[in-house]
């Protein structure tokens, strides 16, 4: 838990990872989205993880939940990945 009482970032990542791990059809979509959202030259920054720009994440959380500090629901992550997969198949 964080000082505000919410789940710790590692707890959120674990829950989201488990939600996605149970859906192998989404794994290629996860890899594509990580590649699309990672900033150019992400491997040059420490730690070398392909994480999206924090400002982008704050914007997306603000528009989705009205709170840039809120952790997304793991189910919403799965819904987003399904949407990405469907859009790709539709050619969009």
Image (cartoon, grey):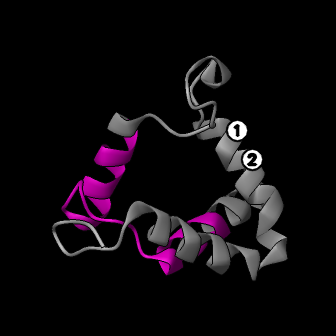
- Which stretch appears magenta? 56-82
The residue at 55%/25% (across/down) is: 46
Question: What percent of the width, then of the height, locates residue 75?
Answer: 51, 80
For disc 1, the marked residue is 35
In reply to whether residue 75 is colored magenta, the answer given is yes
Q: Residues within 10 Å of mark 1 (few under 14, many from 20)?
A: some
Distance, label 1 to label 2, CA atoms, is: 5 Å
Q: Name the residue under label 2.
A: 32
In the displayed structure image, the side of residue 21 where residue 53 appears, left or right: left
Helix, strand or loop at mark 1: helix
Taking depth in this image into account, of 65 and 74 the one nearest to the observer is 74
Residue 86 against residue 56 in the figure, above or below: below
Above or below residue 61? Residue 78 is: below
Residue 45 appears at what percent x and percent y?
56, 21
Contact flag, marks 1 and 2 (Cβ < 8 Å): yes
- Side of 3 where 44 appears, left or right: right
């Amino acid at each position: 838990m964080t000082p505000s009482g919410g789940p710790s970032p590692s707890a959120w990542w674990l829950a989201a990872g488990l939600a996605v791990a149970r859906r192998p059809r989404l794994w290629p979509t996860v890899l594509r989205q990580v590649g699309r959202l990672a900033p150019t030259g992400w491997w040059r920054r420490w730690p070398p993880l392909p994480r999206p720009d924090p400002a982008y994440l704050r914007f997306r959380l603000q528009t989705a939940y009205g709170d840039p500090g809120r952790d997304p629901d793991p189910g919403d992550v799965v819904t987003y990945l399904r949407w990405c997969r469907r859009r790709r198949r539709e050619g969009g």
